[in-house]
Amino acid sequence: MRRKNFILLLLLCLQMGFAQYKMPVAFVSSLQPAQPGQEAGMCNDNNANTLYHSRYNLTTAMPDQLSFNFSNRVKSVNRLVYKPRLAGPNGIWTSVKISYSTQTNPNVFVDATGIITWAANNTAKTIDLPTVIIKPAVIKVDVLSAQNNFSSCAEMEFYSDEQVDPIQSECVLPANEFAAYTDIPVLPQVSGSSASSIQAGEGIEKSFDGNINTLYHCDWNATAATFPISLVYRFDGQTAMNYLRYTPRQDGGPNGLFGNVKISYNTVSNPNYIDLSIQNFGQTNTIKTVVFPSAITPLNIKIEVLDGKNNFASCAEMEFFRTNPNSFDLSAYSNIFNDTILSTLKPSVSQQDINAISSPFIKGLAQCLFNNTYHKKYRVQTFSAYKTIESINTQYKIGNYNNYENPTGIVFQTNTTAIVFAKDITAAHKVYLKIRDFATEGSSPEKSYELKNGLNILNITNAGLGYISYYTDDTNAAPISVNITAGIVNGIYKKGTASAEWTAMLTNDVYPKIDIEGYYTKLVINKSAVSNFLLQILSR
């Protein structure tokens, strides 16, 4: 029995010792032009049913060369696997040669193999490298011959006996201590909540389902005579709350944006409605927060929409909150930081001072600043206001304009706590951190988180790229400054960005898309789509 256990243990150790891990490729390019829809990236999409294929009308695609670019997370590569097309002969590689460059010298290439000859069939081909490639930057596959002088590849895979380094922030800060200071959401009950006008499938419950891509909408046949439209939100009658937040539809459509509204409530002991506030939301897509004069403990809150854009009423989300009675005392660290957004240390701060900080978060932030490892270029920025979308649409007679000005260059993860410090925000102009997951294409979930001066504790419920949403028609609106301590830096390409930094952005594996800012336009584009331009720049 002991012998069997020893043998099993030995086999397990051997298996672990020879384990191979598949390495991620940042992007791929080909020397020969690809057939549209069968670009080089298709040979690294984890789908053997798709393939890279040289353009069909080429006289010959030989020689071809595929360049596979890696991020610095990849420690080594010791094996390559070429998977030809599943059926058919065209383009199957029969003669190749491998070379590589390293992260230390990305433009200097070294031969990894001599010429390798393969049979012209559809079976996978494995190359065990004679020497392990340490910290690869680019691995090139020179295709010297292929069936019928085309070039094709279903999948090209790279392996290592070392696991890839995880993607993580340059400054990981524990935010658990802030759970005791966040405001508490109060969720309405579906049963008992109602609207005086609804469109089938877009009832009031859609306004508190936690999804801004769904919405409450009144009857599509509504007219001016339909108003006021009453939205009644039912609660347990025992829970206090201090404010509400109205999120208009965020899909670019104008119909139903709230104008003037009247807010009232009743209680378990008093069924008569008591007026709270009259507000003008301006029929815009700006998120509005209404702070109640004092705390209330409602059975129902009634929002009477007195007018809406194009004689409709719609709402993406209506949220209710109880203010947390506890507060985090930032003034306790005024001897450590030189500004109110905690972005610089006082010159006199020493390691001994940092060691004495009791807050794990504050200590970690101070340490990163002290070590100069904090990525201040993206985390600490000043942002200017942009004219409202409605004004631009009206002025230029266009359907919709850019809702994503002021990119931060930071990617956020779902179900995390983001600590953001802000200053110079005025009561007249609301500012939000807007997060949108462009990587999901069509669905693209997004959510906006309101910012205020000082400490902001944001419970991030959706992943994606971050933007500072700051829109106003006030031409005198002053810039605001933020320090975003959470998320992972992805980067922004602007005119003057150095080639090395551009390469690092495209290969950092943080997010599949990148923000690009030009003189007259801004883009969010797939990194793979611009990789060829990078290679052209580097080869000059």
Image (cartoon, rainbow, N blue to C red):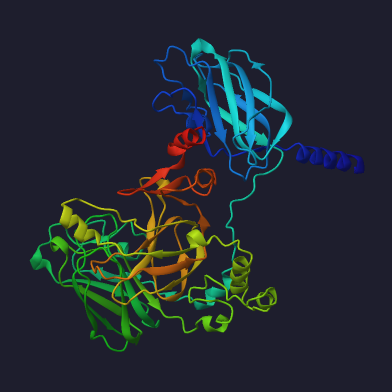
Location of residue 314 by image quarter: bottom left
Vertical order, 343 against 51 (above or below): below
- Camera sees residue 254: no
Residue at 52% of width from left, 80% of height from top? 330
Q: How many marks?
A: 0
- Location of the N terminus (image quadrant): top right
- For this rendering, which residue is in front, 492 or 246? 492
x and y percentages locating residue 408 in the rendered image: 43, 58
Residue at 13% of width from left, 63% of height from top? 311
Vertical order, 180 against 198 (above or below): below
x and y percentages locating residue 355 in the rendered image: 69, 75
x and y percentages locating residue 428 in the rendered image: 28, 75
Vertical order, 131 against 481 (above or below): above
Q: Residue furthest left?
A: 225
Location of residue 214 by image quarter: bottom left
Q: Is residue 477 left or right of residue 182?
A: left
Q: Is residue 513 left or right of residue 394?
A: right
x and y percentages locating residue 509 in the rendered image: 54, 46
Residue at 12% of width from left, 58% of height from top? 221
- Camera sees residue 103: yes
Residue at 19% of width from left, 55% of height from top? 393
- For this rendering, which residue is in front, 374 or 326? 374
Q: Is residue 358 left or right of residue 307?
A: right
Q: Residue furthest bottom?
A: 269
